[in-house]
Structure formats: C-alpha cells, structure tokens
C-alpha cells in the first residue's frame, strides 16, 4: 500500500516528474563539491545546523548533498520535502512538534531530532519539482524574509547546476556517439577499400593459375612508373610455352590439362622473385619480366623452371620450351624485347622442345 503522502504525490503529473528527474541521471551518484557547497551556503545563510540538497525519487528522498544530518536518504513517506512537491513552493516549519507530518521525521542532528525545517523547491523549466534545498535545526526557529529569499536563490542555483551537469553529460554522450560513428564509418571505409582491393586483385588474376592475367600486364604497361621500374638497370623477358599441350588435353582430358597448367604456374611463381612479374600470357603460354636482371641470371632461372616442370609429379611427363631475351631501356622498346623472346621460344620449339633458347640478336 502506498503511504498517505505517496497517494497525494502520485497524481497525474508524477510519471512525467519522475521521467524529468531521470533525465538528470543524478540519483545515487557520488557527492560533488558544487552541491556540497550549495548545502553549506544554505546552512550559512539560514544559520541552521544542517542542510541538504534532496531529490525526490519514486519511493525515497535521496540527498545529493547533506551536512549535519545522519542519513543519505529517507523513505518518501517520512520526507518533509514531499510537502514541497505538493505545494510547489517554499515550506517553512518552525516547530516540528507542532506539525503532525513533521513530527514523523526520523532525521536527527547528532543525538537530537530535527525540530525546525525549511525547504525551497528545485523547479525545472517545464515546472516539475525534482526536490528541494533544505535546512534543518534541532531547535525551533523561523527564517527571516532575507534568509528565505537566500534559500530560494540557492535552490535556483542548485537547479542551474543540475542543468549544467545534464548539458555536460549530453555533450559527452554526443561526443561518444560521434566517436563511435566515426569509428564505424572508418571501419566501413576500410572494409570497402579492402573489398575494392580484393575485387581489383581478382580482376587482375587468372582464375585457373592465380598468376597475373594479360589485362593486368596491359594495365601495368600503361603505368609509366611501373614501366620505369621494370626497365630500370636492364631487364630480361622469359616466355614459356607448354610442349604438346594439345596432346595432354586430348590424351588425359581437360581437367588434367588444367592441373598441368597450374603446376607450371606454381613452378614459375616459386622460381621468381616478388619483384618479378609473372603472367599467364595465353592458354599454355607464360611470360616473366625480370627487372634488374642480367641475361646470365635470367637464363639460369629459365633452366630452373624447365627442370622443375619436367620433374613435376603428374601422370605424364610435362615439358616446356623457353625463350629468354635481355632488354636495355636505352636500346630497346619493350615490344622488340618481346619479339626477340618470342623468336627464341620459336627456335626452342623448332629445335626439339623441352629446352631454353637465349636470344642472340646483335643489337646496335
Ligand atoms: N586444359 C586447358 N587447356 C587449355 C587451356 N588454354 C588453352 N588450352 C589448350 O592448349 C592447347 C594449345 O595447343 P597448341 O597451341 O596447339 O600447342 P601445343 O599442343 O602445346 O603444341 P606446341 O606448343 O607446338 O608444343 C590447346 O589444345 C588449347 O585448347 C586451359 O585453360 N586449360
């Protein structure tokens, strides 16, 4: 059963008042100097022994600041500030013993019960009473007009403090939300970039072998920086063509043919450096560009590729023919180097396959 005073407080506006109080998020927060100062000033202004800044919750009056009294909260049924909620005005009780409701207050100042009380309402802009700035004494006393006005000024100041505190909290929350949103946007952006990079990479890669495809090579050759990087300090091109691959397909089937192509691509990848560019150039044809590499070294790599392909564990022997050509950015255009590597490859095919032929064209 709600108490008598609660019944009176539980009027139509009570849910809205409690909602207003909740918006300040003040209940059960630790003491704060600014509210302690208000209580101390109230005590000084009114010349009393005790003071409090009280907020009236659903079932209790809770003290944000309390000086000189022995409790941090009271059941709402026993709180004098309850009366301020109903009157919405300053309440002064000069002698509690002469006041039936006040006499029930369990508050003590030291050993002695509270005998006099005054409280000014904490009034919100939308006219809700959240609680009161109160003073109390263990002797009967009344307030002068000036003291009463001082208490009311302090109640307005306490309300300002509550507003400022709420504003600061709102600002903090908005900042936190903004930070969280910025982080979400950043994460989404990074994910999009990663997706974009994955898509680009997929578009640049040959599906079967994972090597760069011919489109990627064409793009690369349109990028002056990349061309510059590939050509700098001399480079070599290696062209690799699988021998009698039509027969492989015809005899062993297309699936095994695919497996053979993947095996060649794996050998090529494993034989070159990260900085080299390995491309599946045609169906069973591969191109490797080796920047900063002399012909002797490129030829060595070509032989290694040829040997490793031949040694690959497949149900048949797989071989490749290879043409190697050096490029000098001062003397050759890239197409010329390619042509010479192609000629060398042609000679490797024509002279029996499964071999490396090095371009020996004299350049002037
Ligand atoms: N399994 C498979 N076969 C392919 C693929 N791309 C091209 N080929 C086959 O590769 C074969 C190439 O045959 P050719 O160009 O006649 O050359 P070759 O049989 O290797 O003969 P030489 O190059 O003269 O030694 C064709 O049968 C194509 O169908 C592929 O992705 N998978």
Image (spheres, grey):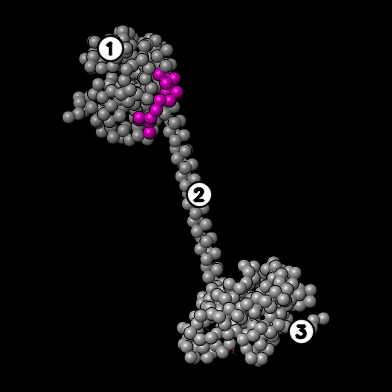
Residue 47: x %, y % from top left: 39, 10
- What residue would you read off at disc 1? 113
Where residue 355 sits, quadrant-wise, is bottom right
Instruction: Pinpoint residue 240: horizontal percent, then vertical percent.
Output: 62, 81
Q: Is mark 2 within 8 Å of ligand 1?
A: no
Q: Is residue 79 left or right of residue 319?
A: left
Upstream in the sequence, badge 1 or badge 3? Answer: 1
Regarding ligand 1, which quadrant of the image does it lie in?
A: bottom right
Q: Residues within 10 Å of mark 3 (few under 14, many from 20)?
A: few
Residue 140 shows in this picture: yes
Q: Residues within 10 Å of mark 2 (few under 14, many from 20)?
A: few
Q: What SS does tag 3 mark?
A: loop
**Local SS, label 1:** strand
Residue 116 located within the stretch drawn in magenta? no
Q: Which residue is mark 2?
A: 182
Q: Position of residue 185 (x, y in %)?
A: 50, 53
Q: Is residue 31 magenta?
A: yes
Relative to 338, is 142 above or below? Answer: above
Position of residue 309 relative to residue 59, above or below, is: below
The structure residue drawn at horizontal position 50% and vertical position 82%, both measured from the top left corner, is 314
Q: Left or right? Give the position of 178 relative to 331.
A: left
Q: Badge 3 is on which residue?
A: 361
Cβ atoms at labels 1 and 2 below 8 Å apart: no
> Are the residues at dot 1 and dot 3 in contact (C-beta closer than 8 Å)?
no
Q: Is residue 212 visible?
A: no
Magenta region, residue range:
25-39
Label of residue 133 in the image: none
The residue that appears at 49% across and 54% down in the rendered structure is 187
Query: Quarter of the image holding residue 73?
Result: top left
Q: Is 227 placed above or below 115 here?
A: below
The residue closer to the viewer here, 323 or 194, is: 323
């Amino acid at each position: 059963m709600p108490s008598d005073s609660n019944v009176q407080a539980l009027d139509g506006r009570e849910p809205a008042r409690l909602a207003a109080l909740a918006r300040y998020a003040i209940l059960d927060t630790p003491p704060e100097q600014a509210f302690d100062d208000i209580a101390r000033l109230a005590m000084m202004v009114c010349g009393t022994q005790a003071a409090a800044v009280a907020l009236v919750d659903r079932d209790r009056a809770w003290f944000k600041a309390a000086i000189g009294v022995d409790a941090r909260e009271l059941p709402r049924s026993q709180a004098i500030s309850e009366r301020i909620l109903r009157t919405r005005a300053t309440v002064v009780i000069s002698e509690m013993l002469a006041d039936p409701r006040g006499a029930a207050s369990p508050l003590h100042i030291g050993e002695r019960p509270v005998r006099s009380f005054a409280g000014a309402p904490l009034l919100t802009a939308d006219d809700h009473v959240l609680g009161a700035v109160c003073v109390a004494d263990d002797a009967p006393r009344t307030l002068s007009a000036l003291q009463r006005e001082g208490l009311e000024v302090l109640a307005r100041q306490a309300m300002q403090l509550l507003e400022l505190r709420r504003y600061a909290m709102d600002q903090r929350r908005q900042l936190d939300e903004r930070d969280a949103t910025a982080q979400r946007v950043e994460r989404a952006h990074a994910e999009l970039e990663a997706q974009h990079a994955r898509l680009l990479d997929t578009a640049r890669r040959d599906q079967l072998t994972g090597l760069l495809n011919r489109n990627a090579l064409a793009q690369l050759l349109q990028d002056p920086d990349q061309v510059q990087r590939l050509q700098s300090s001399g480079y070599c091109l290696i062209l690799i063509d699988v021998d009698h691959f039509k027969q492989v397909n015809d005899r062993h089937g297309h699936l095994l043919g695919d497996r053979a192509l993947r095996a060649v691509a794996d050998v090529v990848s494993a034989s070159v450096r990260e900085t080299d560019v390995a491309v599946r150039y045609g169906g069973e044809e591969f191109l490797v560009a080796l920047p900063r590499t002399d012909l002797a070294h490129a030829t060595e790599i070509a032989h290694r590729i040829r040997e490793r392909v031949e040694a690959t564990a497949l149900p048949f022997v797989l071989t490749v023919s290879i043409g190697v050509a050096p490029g000098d950015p001062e003397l050759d255009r890239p197409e010329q180097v390619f042509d010479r590597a192609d000629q060398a490859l042609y000679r490797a095919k024509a002279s029996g396959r499964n071999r490396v032929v090095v371009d020996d064209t004299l350049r002037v």
